[in-house]
Amino acid sequence: MREFLAEADQAARQLGQDANHMWTAFGPTNVDIHRVATAGELGDMQVAIDLGPRIDTSSLPTERRTRHNIEVARALSAHNRVDDALAVILEAESWAPEQVRSHYLARELVLTWVRNQRGRPSRAMADLADRLHVV
């Protein structure tokens, strides 16, 4: 994974900017997004938390931005920062509600948050859980 990311980073630096040629959304930002996602998949949530929120995804297609927010929410949630994670998911939902509502990871996160709440979940969390049909 590190070799692949290093190779992608080198190609992105040669490109010199984020681009969306042939719908690839490839560039330095996308490589950083993949660093966050792979860190999350490998269970290194600290790397995902350290890098994820600092990445400016505003120039990327909505799908990439949304998926990145879901990955950041997973990392924040793993560190018991549920309120921050919820805010990140809600931001993503404002960009691409259909993507958040159908993504397995977003649905899994929200279901876990609702189940782990002591007492009633916040209105924002309950409404999101309802929109995702997880409760």
Image: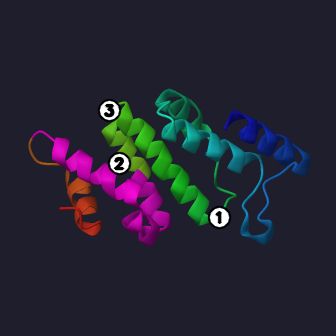
**Mark number displayed over residue 10:** none
Mark 1 nearby-residue class (10 Å; few <14, some 14–19, many ≥20): some
131 vs 18, left or right, is: left
- How far is disc 1 from disc 3 in space, using C-alphas? 29 Å
Q: Measuring 78% from the left and 54% from the top, which residue is drawn there?
A: 18
Foreground: 103 or 128?
Answer: 103
Amino acid under disc 3 = Asn
Please identify the quarter of the rendering in which residue 126 is found: bottom left
Query: Is label 1 in a helix, a strand or a loop?
Result: loop
Q: Measuring 67% from the left and 59% from the top, which residue is drawn there?
A: 60
Foreground: 95 or 42?
Answer: 42
Amino acid under disc 1 = Pro
Instruction: Tell me the quadrant of the picture where the N terminus can be found.
Output: top right
Q: Measuring 28% from the left and 60% from the top, which residue is drawn there?
A: 128
Amino acid under disc 2 = Leu
35 up-or-down from 106: above or below: above
Q: Earlier in the sequence, mark 1 or mark 2?
A: 1
Please give the range of residues in magenta: 89-118
- Image coords of residue 3 (percent x, y): 75, 36
Main SS of residues in magenta: helix
Q: Earlier in the sequence, mark 2 or mark 3?
A: 3
Instruction: Tell me the quadrant of the picture where the C terminus can be found.
Output: bottom left
- How far is disc 2 from disc 3 in space, using C-alphas? 11 Å
Residue ID for mark 2: 86
- How far is disc 1 from disc 2 in space, using C-alphas? 21 Å
> Which label sits in the foreground, 2 or 3?
3
The answer to if 112 sits in the magenta stretch is yes
The answer to if 7 sits in the magenta stretch is no
Query: Is label 2 in a helix, a strand or a loop?
Result: helix
Outermost residue toward the left in this view? 119
Residue ID for mark 1: 61
**Mark number displayed over residue 80:** 3
